[in-house]
């Protein structure tokens, strides 16, 4: 069983080192500035930008500040079957062999959700691909986890990219790095070890990434040449550096769509040191709302970070409000208490929910699993069943459930922001990652609750009124038409009209 994540990350670290999320982020930023890591290059590639997200994540895992759940046996079987499906899809529908011609290449994250109208579709780029009015092509990793892609938008898979790169990584010529670059990486590794207690082999991490780039970059160039795209739209741009590099070399503009929570702790996006624009940044970033434009120091001029909205949430918010009367506040001490779990924090949140159920609130509590937790949760969180907590997952539509619960509990996730925009009261369990929610707490839009007993008392005593904020600063309304027009403008070489509004 995975141990409960530590709230400080300090236990068991040498020398009393501070290794919580704030401290890890500060250690990485200080090492960047001290050693000039963002200026390092080899084989024409910006080395540190390509690995900084992975380095930050590894430090969080190694210090215990955050970590993935331990797989259970049923998950291992599921992963084997998923890999078999992935192999079949990567051969039959590869993006790299005869892709259809397109005007806009959408590079998704591989995440899909089931919708009655659109089938299995990508929640961020899918609606925009449908509505943009240009010939789209979606290219993403399949990962064997979803049903057939939604009709109407050609979809091809990138999984073969990873499969065909394995031989080159194993026996290919090692990437070349200058001695001064190697020395700088070693110095940075020592600095990070002194400040976090974690030893990372930055030399090996960098060489593996360069080996992958050596294989991936010509593949992406070939994809762009064959499909003829004049615009690339990406999710998770920090995971697609080779695609961004290929597009930049071919003078194809890149738009990135926000896909999740932005924060000064997200090292795919946060570049606060004033080192100028990283070479692999997109040309435009389309944020969900004004709140997100300053949630992290994005590596773009402010006028190129636009509050566009989130089309999926726009539509589902309207449907959720139709199916649930949001104007009628629940009576004092009534209404569902919805826990929104996350894979890396499921142990902490599930124990909190079980303890809260023991406070006489069993009938009110619903624990919603993250998709990564659904397989094997009975083994991982047996206390939920023992406490009689209702548990649900992706079989239950998210937005009606968010809209129907007046109280939401979690630590940090996109769903918590969506629930806030739907009018829920938000309570945060102090656990690793709560720092992502600092601004909401300072603004009084979320309340930190340290114990199940304290939360139970608040739920019994506080009236069921909704917050006054509409949440439009989090998710700007009218997103789909604005996003489609902005995509067309960039594809045609124009500045989006939304840029004027900032």
Image (spheres, rainbow, N blue to C red):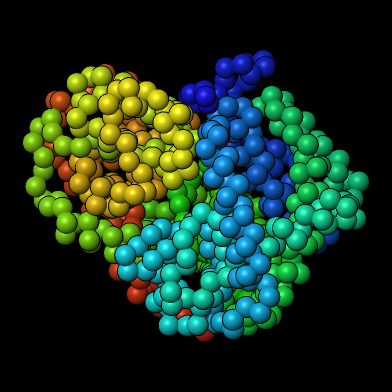
Q: Is residue 496 left or right of residue 30?
A: left
> In the image shown, does 206 or 2 lie closer to the viewer?
2
Residue at x 53%, y 51% (from the top left corner): 297
Looking at the rendered image, the quarter that the C terminus falls into is bottom left
Q: Position of residue 237 (x, y in %)?
A: 58, 59
Q: Is residue 107 left or right of residue 430?
A: right
Say how many tags the image has.
0
> In the image shown, does 386 or 10 lie closer to the viewer?
386
Residue 28 visible to the viewer: yes
Residue at x 76%, y 44% (from the top left corner): 205
Residue at x 69%, y 69% (from the top left corner): 220
> In the image shown, does 126 or 441 lie closer to the viewer?
126
In the displayed structure, 39 sits above or below 301; it is: above
Q: Position of residue 433 (x, y in %)?
A: 47, 35
Residue at x 76%, y 58% (from the top left corner): 165
Residue 305 visible to the viewer: no
In the displayed structure, 293 sits above or below 52; it is: below
Q: Position of residue 393 (x, y in %)?
A: 36, 44
In the displayed structure, 385 sits above or below 138; it is: above
Q: Is residue 441 left or right of residue 62?
A: left
Q: Position of residue 253 (x, y in %)?
A: 59, 74
């Amino acid at each position: 069983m995975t141990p409960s994540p530590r709230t400080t990350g300090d236990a068991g670290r040498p020398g009393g080192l501070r290794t919580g999320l704030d401290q890890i982020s500060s250690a990485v930023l200080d090492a960047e500035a001290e050693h000039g890591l963002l200026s390092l290059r080899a084989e024409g590639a910006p080395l540190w930008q390509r690995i900084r997200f992975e380095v930050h994540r590894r430090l969080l895992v190694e210090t215990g500040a955050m970590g993935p759940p331990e797989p259970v046996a049923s998950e291992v079987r599921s992963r084997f079957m998923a890999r078999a499906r992935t192999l079949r899809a990567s051969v039959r529908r590869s993006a790299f062999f005869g892709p259809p011609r397109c005007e806009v290449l959408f590079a998704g994250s591989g995440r899909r959700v089931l919708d009655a109208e659109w089938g299995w579709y990508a929640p961020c780029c899918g609606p925009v691909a449908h509505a943009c009015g240009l010939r789209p092509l979606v290219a993403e990793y399949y990962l064997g986890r979803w049903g057939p892609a939604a009709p109407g938008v050609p979809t091809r898979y990138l999984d073969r990219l990873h499969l065909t790169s394995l031989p080159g990584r194993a026996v290919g010529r090692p990437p070349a790095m200058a001695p001064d670059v190697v020395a700088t990486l070693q110095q940075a590794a020592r600095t990070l070890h002194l400040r976090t207690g974690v030893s990372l082999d930055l030399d090996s991490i960098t060489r593996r990434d360069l080996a992958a780039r050596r294989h991936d970059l010509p593949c992406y160039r070939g994809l762009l040449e064959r499909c003829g795209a004049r615009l690339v739209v990406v999710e998770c741009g920090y995971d697609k550096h080779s695609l961004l590099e290929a597009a930049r070399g071919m003078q194809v503009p890149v738009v990135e769509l926000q896909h999740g929570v932005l924060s000064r702790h997200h090292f795919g996006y946060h570049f606060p040191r004033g080192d100028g624009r990283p070479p692999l940044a997109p040309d435009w970033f389309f944020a969900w709302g004004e709140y997100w434009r300053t949630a992290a120091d994005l590596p773009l001029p402010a006028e190129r970070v636009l509050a566009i909205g989130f089309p999926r949430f726009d539509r589902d918010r309207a449907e959720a409000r139709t199916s649930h009367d949001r104007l009628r506040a629940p009576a004092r001490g009534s209404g569902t208490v919805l826990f929104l779990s996350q894979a890396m924090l499921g142990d902490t949140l599930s124990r909190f929910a079980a303890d809260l159920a023991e406070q006489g609130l069993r009938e009110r509590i619903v624990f919603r699993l993250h998709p990564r937790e659904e397989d094997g949760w009975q083994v991982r969180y047996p206390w939920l069943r023992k406490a009689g907590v209702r548990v649900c997952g992706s079989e239950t539509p998210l937005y009606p459930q968010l809209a129907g619960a007046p109280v939401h509990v979690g630590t940090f996730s996109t769903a918590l922001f969506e629930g806030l925009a739907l009018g829920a009261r938000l309570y945060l369990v102090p656990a690793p990652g709560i720092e992502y929610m600092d601004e909401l707490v300072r603004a009084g839009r979320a309340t930190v609750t340290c114990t199940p007993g304290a939360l139970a008392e608040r739920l019994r005593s506080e009236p069921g009124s909704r917050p006054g904020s509409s949440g439009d600063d989090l998710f700007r309304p009218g997103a789909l038409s604005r996003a489609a027009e902005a995509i067309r403008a960039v594809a045609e070489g124009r500045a989006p009209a939304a840029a004027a509004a900032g």
